[in-house]
Structures are given as structure tokens and as C-alpha cells.
Amino acid sequence: MRAPSPTDIAAGEVILAVENVSLGFGGVKALTDVSFDIRKGEVRAIIGPNGAGKTSMLNCINGFYHPTEGRITFKGKTRPKMRPHEAAAGGIARTFQNVALFKGMSTLDNIMAGRTLKMKRGFFWHVLRYGPAMDEEIAHRRSVEEIIDFLEIQHIRKVPVGKLPYGLQKRVELGRALAMEPDVLLLDEPMAGMNLEEKEDMCRFILDVSNQYGTTIALIEHDMGVVMDLSDRVVVLEYGRKIADGTPDEVKRDQRVIDAYLGVGH
């Protein structure tokens, strides 16, 4: 698939819109009146200091939390309250700050778990492993093997993920999310805990996911070098409020962003 050009992205349709979203837990405000959009085919970064509300925002987008005010529109439809599995079925996949894998299962089986929503045959058929269910499983395994090749993890396909180093576990988690064939992929600190070489690999895979799969990506990341290299647009949060939104160059020159990261006035 052809990589989207800057012109495509500038004119790209909005696939997801966050409109005046607020989120509170009792007397604590995690988000206050936040609005931004994500355009089809772009890499959209959400950044900010610790406690800015970044993960809370992703949790609202994929149904872990329900906004107390505002609305979220996905693929042209304003969503009612929904659960994460409904968001996944609708085309939103997610990775987490802390790796959330089945540690006793192999790389292949963990990624295969991401195909569950794509399977049409019932539980009874899959227990029998016969006829249509077997044909379906073979087709899904073929898709999983393509993802394994794409992420260059053939050598660990049968290794239990609990025995893998952290950087490879993060790659397996990315593979499981890709197996869902999402319209929007949410990445929560995909480089956290990685060394330089692992970060370079993950950056390459994220760009390849965008270019080759045509997947729209929203990511949280603290490494500003990574953000500036990967992102088409950046939204900045501080204390649950949006303080800047624009291209990487615009954002890094914004005095409010500089102050937030340097702690000026706090």
C-alpha cells in the first residue's frame, strides 16, 4: 500500500474526533474540556508531563473509561458508552504501558489471540477442530505468520513470551494488536523501558505499520526525539487540559509546551 503523503494527511478525513471531553473521579479531574481529532492515515502523538491525563484519554477512546462530559465520534458516528471489546470489534486496537500478554503462551498463540474477533465459527466447531473451523483457523494462522514475518520475530514464534526480553515482548504485543486489523491503533508508551537499539527497531516498525498497512496511529510517548521523528501532528496535555496542538515543529516552539516540560512557573 502506498504511504500517505503530507498532502493526503493535510486533506485527510477525520476518523476520530474528541470533542470537549472531561473525565472526573470524585473530586479529581483527570481531563478537562479536551478537544482534538485524528485524521485517517496519520501518526498522531499525545504528549505531556507525568500526570497530564494522556493514558486517561486513551482509556476514554477505547472504552475503559466513559467521559463525564463531551463526546467521541469514530468513523462518523458518535459513540454511546461502550466496553473495550466493543471498541475492538469496531476497529480500535490498543497496546499498554505495561506489557499485557499471556506469559505462558507462545508468541504465535499470543498473536493468534488477536484474531479472535475475526473468527466466525462457534466454540463447538473450534473444539472439534474439524471442517469449516479448521479451514478458518488455517486462514487466520496464515495472517498471523505474515505479521510474524513483518515484525521479524520468526525465531521466537514458539517461545513462551514470559521467557522473552522486554523489547521482544513489546513487539509481540504490537503483533497481537495488528492481528485485529484495526482502523485506529492506540500505542501507550511503546518505547518505555527499551534501550536505544530496541527503540530504533520499534520506530521502524511503527512507521512500517503506518506506511504498509495504512493504519492510523495515536501514540503516547515521553521520548521527544521519537515523537518529533514519527508524528504528523502532536497534541499536548498538562494537568488534564490541552495546551498545544499542531505539527511537531509548531509544538516544540510553543512557549507553553517548553514551560510545561521545564516546570517553569510550577
Image: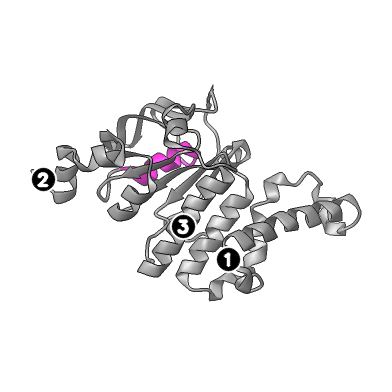
**Mark nearer the N terminus (3 vs 1):** 1
Q: Residue at x 40, y 69 (%)?
A: 197
Where residue 172 appears, as percent x and y from the top left, is 56, 62
Front disc: 1 or 2: 1
Q: Is residue 73 visible?
A: yes
Q: Which residue is labeled 1 in the image?
A: 152
Q: Main secondary structure of the magenta part?
A: helix
Judged from this view, the residue extending furthest toward the right is 131
Tally of numbered tags: 3
**Above or below: residue 203 compared with residue 261:** below
Q: Is residue 179 magenta?
A: no
In the structure shown, which secondary structural element does the residue marked by tag 3 occupy? Answer: helix
**Above or below: residue 178 compared with residue 59:** below
- C-alpha separation, residue under disc 2 versus residue under disc 3: 36 Å
- Mark 2 neighbour density, 10 Å: few (under 14) some (14–19) many (20 or more): few
In magenta, the rendered stretch is: 53-64
In the structure shown, which secondary structural element does the residue marked by tag 2 occupy? Answer: loop
Type of amino acid at the residue the image marks with label 3: Arg
Q: Which residue is labeled 3 in the image?
A: 204
Q: Residue at x 35, y 50 (%)?
A: 229
Q: Which residue is labeled 2 in the image?
A: 266
Query: In the rendered view of the protein, which quadrant contains the N terminus?
Result: top right
**Mark nearer the N terminus (2 vs 3):** 3
Type of amino acid at the residue the image marks with label 1: Glu
